[in-house]
Amino acid sequence: MEAKEGKKGRLLLGSQLDAKDELEERLERCVGIVQALTNGLSEREANDALTANVCKGQQQHEEVCLGLFSLLLTEPAQAQRCYRDLTLLSRDGMSIILLKINQILMEKFLKLQDTPRTQLVWLVKELVKSGVVGADGVLMTLLKQIAGGDISSKNLWLSENVLEILLDQKEFVLKNGMLIAMSVYTYLRLIVDHGAPNLLILRQKEFAECQIIGRDLVRLLQNVARIPEVELVWKDLLHNPQVLSPQFTGVLQLLTARTSRKFLACRLTPDMETKLLFMTSRVRFGQQKRYQDWFQRQYLSTAESQSLRCDLIRYICGVVHPSNEVLSSDILPRWAIIGWLLTTCTSNVAASNAKLALFYDWLFFNPEKDSIMNIEPAILVMHHSMKPHPAITATLLDFMCRIIPHFFPPLETQVRQGVFNSLTFIMEKRVLAHLAPLFDNPKLDRELRSMLRERFPEFCSSPSPPTEGTVKMEESVSMEMDNNVLDKEEGCYDNTEAAFSDDEEEVSNKGKKREFRFHPIREAVVEEPADITPWLDQLDDTMKEK
């Protein structure tokens, strides 16, 4: 046992059963080379020996640099000397070191032992302090590792230390507009979880850079607008915009600008992003439960993690845009994941914010600038929830109606136009052929149907009978929402206990319908006759009579 313990690495966590990590093995070999070259030598002699070895070729250069890098991570007492030697010996502007830092951050960060984790953050700080070319990219990757909805000591430590780097090295930060914007986006989002840490000061130059974030900057500021340090900025944003930047005309300028994928993606850790992309590209619709259960346990099981749902929904709407090949396959559709995120939400505040995240691109939608893929998930969640769980459709439709006058009263006209543009574009692109069956459905209560008719009279009237050509077009473009829906729709947000066997699950599905559970909404299932009048009215007289 002692012999086995001796072989355990000092970089990554792992059990005795885990195979040795290739990167860790390589770094250990490089440490051995450095130690063999320098053992028993004075500091000057050691430096001369390393310099001579580096001059031999590219391989020797990499071995020495990676050996010093590994010692820096695992031996804090030698860190300063190793970093100094690295700056003297590196012949590639530290590019091999930056490459390995990014690899560790993206692939190994969750497995790092405590000492290497602390040392890695220290090294990033030193690289930024030295103004190394490419250090900004490493810092942005480190920002991405700060998880939303996580108030564990490790995550808070990382958040505080990265913020300290940003504040201490402000001159470096101000040279990179994308780093400024990503930092502000990250900490505006995290401040909801962490209380009120010192925020980057939004002076004129910083705010001008932050405008590139677009409409989601307003969404994040709105969440923290009551915090005194942010309230002044919020009031200026609404009422005195040119104080923030001479070129800034007002909040509408931000709300009409679509947020870049880079910002929406920066609030998911690499592991979250990998899991979501796997579910939306590899998992079959109807077989997603085990993956959702895992994600729930890992990232959504605490009260604090409820705020993460907004980040996930914004990411799915704005970043995950499947190809036509995926849309026409039986791969898990985006609307099903969003439906699951909505129905498993346990906080009313988080549920409201999640609905706003889902509809956010609708509010100021411009067909010339915005993408149909950003607004498609919301309409499909409502469409597919109508049959198995009309309460979900009803709450989303109600939210869509009420957000128009209440989002920001001075811009009510623009919000109304944005939602109208979204619905019109949805019909033009044949995401849904008609909206009347959704808006004027007998399963909705009378008050909601009345409000929908009042807000959207253009979409509530029964359409004329479709022609044969139209029917064929609808069938070809709506494969994503119709594919396997009849078999799987009732279990699309299933939150029942996990089963271990796919085969057993398929047998039970064929034998009887699985119980359908939604949380936190609970209501009895009532069997009642279906009113098919709205669909009968679409037929010509001869067919209607038959």
Image (cartoon, rainbow, N blue to C red):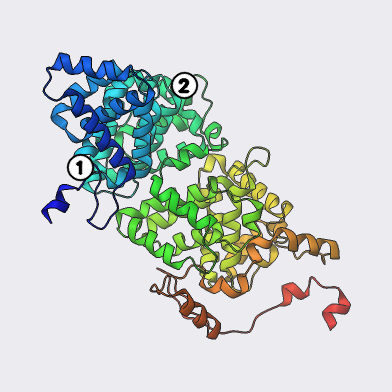
The image position of residue 390, as x and y in percent, is 55, 70
The image position of residue 310, as x and y in percent, is 43, 50
The image position of residue 293, as x and y in percent, is 39, 65
Q: Residue at x 35, y 33 (%)?
A: 100
- Categorize mark 2 by other alpha carbons within 10 Å: few (<14), some (14-19), many (20+): some
Mark 1: amino acid: Arg
The residue lying furthest to the right in this view is 542
Above or below 185: residue 305: below
Judged left or right of residue 1, residue 107 is: right
Corner quadrant of residue 487: bottom right
Q: Observer-nearest residue: 252 or 508?
A: 508
Q: Observer-nearest residue: 225 or 430?
A: 430
Mark 2: amino acid: Ser
| Residue 72 visible from this viewpoint | yes
- Categorize mark 1 by other alpha carbons within 10 Å: few (<14), some (14-19), many (20+): some
Q: Observer-nearest residue: 158 or 148?
A: 158
Q: Which residue is mark 1?
A: 10
Above or below 33: residue 397: below
| Circle on res. 245 | 2
